[in-house]
Image (cartoon, rainbow, N blue to C red):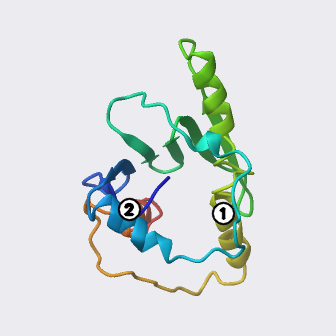
């Protein structure tokens, strides 16, 4: 579905607050054969471990841009995502100093064919609170929130490199995270 050899990138707003991460179904950094060869060396934990029904990994081209994944983050707590044909909203709702609610809203459209509606419903299993791929989306925030009490006077910095929050023609970057904090810290008085 998504390889780092696929065309993609991160577009970041000048103020850093918002960003769009995207992947297109094109192999541009290397050829398709070379990309297959690079990924062939990645071992599986279980030999012959496969999906019983890989049909939900297929995609119907809807928008003419060959985009397979797009995550549009709108500061501070709203995300619009497209994963294949699954389109969803993610909302982070603070419920107090020690509790946050993550809501997922999946979208379909009146004009969808029965086949597209069935595909959207099947692909909804890829992402979300119980998704095959992204169960960690909800879990990571919970891990961080559980670790914070008692460490209010502590700080740490982990960097992949750099301080900028500019758009990049690849997805292996923390620039969007730096952009978020560039906008968030002044709002919190830091």
Q: How far apart are marks 2 and 1 (CA)?
A: 18 Å
Q: Residue 136 carries which label?
A: 1
- The residue at the point 37 percent across, 29 percent down is 63
Mark 2 or mark 1: whose residue is earlier in sequence: 1
Front label number (2 vs 1) = 1
- The picture places residue 104, in percent across and down from the top left corner, at 66, 41
> On screen, 74 above or below 162?
above
Residue at the location (34% across, 59% down)? 32
What label sits on residue 64 in the rendered view? none
Other-residue count near label 2 (Cα within 10 Å), few / some / many at <14 / 14–19 / ≥20: many
Left or right of residue 32: residue 137: right
SS state under label 1: helix
Residue beneath label 2, please?
A: 176
Dividing the image into 4 quarters, which one contains the C terminus? bottom left
At horizontal 74% and vertical 58% (from top left) the residue drawn is 99
Residue 78, horizontal then vertical, whole percent: 52, 44
The residue closer to the viewer here, 160 or 178, is 160
Q: What element carries label 2?
A: helix
Query: Which percent across, then down, holds residue 105?
Result: 64, 35
Please give left or right for residue 40 compared with residue 186 in the image.
right
Whether residue 5 is visible, yes or no, is no
Crowding near the residue tagged with mark 1, few <14, some 14–19, many ≥20 C-alpha atoms within 10 Å:
some
Instruction: Residue 31: name its quadrant.
Output: bottom left
Q: Determine whether, in the image, residue 131 is placed left or right of residue 109.
A: right
Q: Are marks 2 and 1 in contact (CB under 8 Å)?
A: no
In terms of depth relative to the viewer, which is nearer, 22 or 123? 123
Residue 71, given in percent of the width and then of the height, sits at 46, 48
Task: In the rendered view, tell whether residue 128 sits above or below residue 184.
Answer: above
Q: Which residue is drawn at 59% across and 77% down?
A: 43
């Amino acid at each position: 579905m998504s390889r780092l050899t696929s065309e993609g990138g991160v577009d970041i707003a000048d103020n850093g607050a918002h960003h769009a991460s995207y992947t297109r179904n094109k192999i541009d950094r290397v050829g398709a054969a070379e990309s297959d060869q690079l990924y062939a060396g990645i071992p599986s934990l279980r030999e012959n471990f496969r999906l019983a029904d890989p049909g939900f990994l297929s995609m119907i081209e809807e928008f003419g841009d060959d985009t397979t994944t797009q995550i549009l983050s709108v500061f501070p707590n709203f995300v619009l995502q497209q994963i294949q044909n699954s389109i969803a909203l993610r909302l982070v709702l603070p419920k107090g100093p020690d509790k946050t609610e993550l809501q997922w809203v999946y979208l379909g459209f009146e004009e969808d064919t029965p086949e597209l509606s069935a595909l959207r419903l099947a692909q909804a299993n890829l992402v979300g609170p119980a998704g095959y791929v992204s169960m960690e989306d909800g879990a990571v925030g919970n891990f961080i929130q559980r670790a914070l009490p008692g460490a209010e006077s502590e700080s740490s910095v982990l960097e992949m490199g750099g301080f900028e929050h500019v758009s990049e023609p690849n997805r292996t970057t923390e620039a969007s995270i730096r952009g978020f904090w560039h906008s968030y810290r002044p709002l919190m008085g830091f």
